[in-house]
Image (cartoon, rainbow, N blue to C red):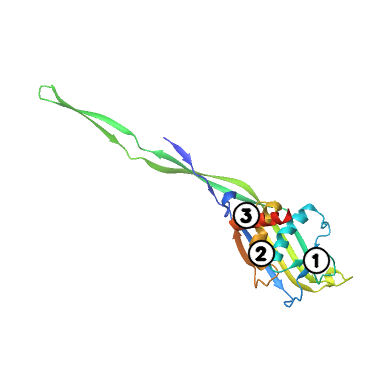
Amino acid sequence: MRTYTLVFLSVFGLTACGSQSIKVSVDSIVGKKDISSKQYTWLSGMRETSRNDLYFREFSRYFQTVLHDHGYQQGTGKDTPVVIYFSYGVSPGRTTKYTTTTPIYEWEGGDTIVYTETKKDKKGKTTSTVTSTVTTPARQRLVGMSVGARRYTVFTRFVTLEAKRYQAGGKSKDMQTLWKTRITSTGSSNDLRALMPIMATASAPYIGVDSGETQVVKMKKNDPRVIEFKQRVRGMAE
């Protein structure tokens, strides 16, 4: 008798990382459509992170490249008419419990029976002997279920770009907002260096324009568009 188990994961979306699509949500809203100039100054929207931070500089290049594709040009001073505040981060991981259900089966049957039939005459003398085999059909039978509990941690990754009309000596909160784009993604990784080019590529068509509603884009890490975009950005940085 043979016994085996088959495991089913009851959590939706738990797939192999190599083939998993990353879902990126983009919500972009425009407050001022007639922007006279697309020359901008790039600033950090995070108090604790300066423009000289190495991660800030690396992540900035992805979105500055997207803005360049939209006709924006980065200026060198605060006399530019537009200032864009760039911020990003990862939320604390949220751990969710899920169960694994394991049906337990066993095989029964499949045995071969050999029997011999002997024929004798009236005097008791053997006249013939016939040997035959009979095999009983094999089938599977459910004998029980095993349930286990596991944990799965997810993170929310986000990027925000907020363009404002620059006012000399003015505070950011008092400047007129021209447009604002917020990009979010939820998944098991908190590695922003791996995710940032994917988020930039997926959101590129909607940055600085009115998306009308939250747009959802699914993209894999090895998507040719992501690979080409990363190579282009790195080539520009060298």
Write down the residue under mark 1. 75
Q: Nearer the viewer, residue 208 or 38?
A: 38
Is 66 located above or below residue 175 in the figure? above
User: For the residue marked with disc 3, what is the amino acid?
Assistant: Ile
Q: Residues within 10 Å of mark 1 (few under 14, many from 20)?
A: some
- Residue pictured at 65% horizontal, 58% vertical: 229
Q: Nearer the viewer, residue 29 or 8?
A: 29
Q: Residues within 10 Å of mark 2 (few under 14, many from 20)?
A: some
Q: Can residue 173 be seen here?
A: yes
Is 103 located above or below residue 52 in the figure? above
Write down the residue under mark 3. 227
Give x and y (percent) for residue 223.
59, 56
Depth-wise, is mark 2 or mark 1 nearer the camera?
1
Residues tagged 3 and 1 counted as in contact (Cβ below 8 A): no
Give x and y (percent) for residue 89.
74, 57
**How many numbered discs?**
3
Q: Nearer the viewer, residue 208 or 213?
A: 208
Give x and y (percent) for residue 141.
42, 43
Q: Earlier in the sequence, mark 2 or mark 1?
A: 1
Secondary element at tag 1? loop
Is 168 located above or below residue 58 in the figure? below
Write down the residue under mark 2. 204
Q: Nearer the viewer, residue 71 or 8?
A: 71
Q: Earlier in the sequence, mark 2 or mark 3?
A: 2
Secondary element at tag 2? helix
In the displayed structure, does residue 209 sit left or right of residue 46? left
- Give the image quarter of residue 128: top left
Give x and y (percent) for residue 100.
56, 47
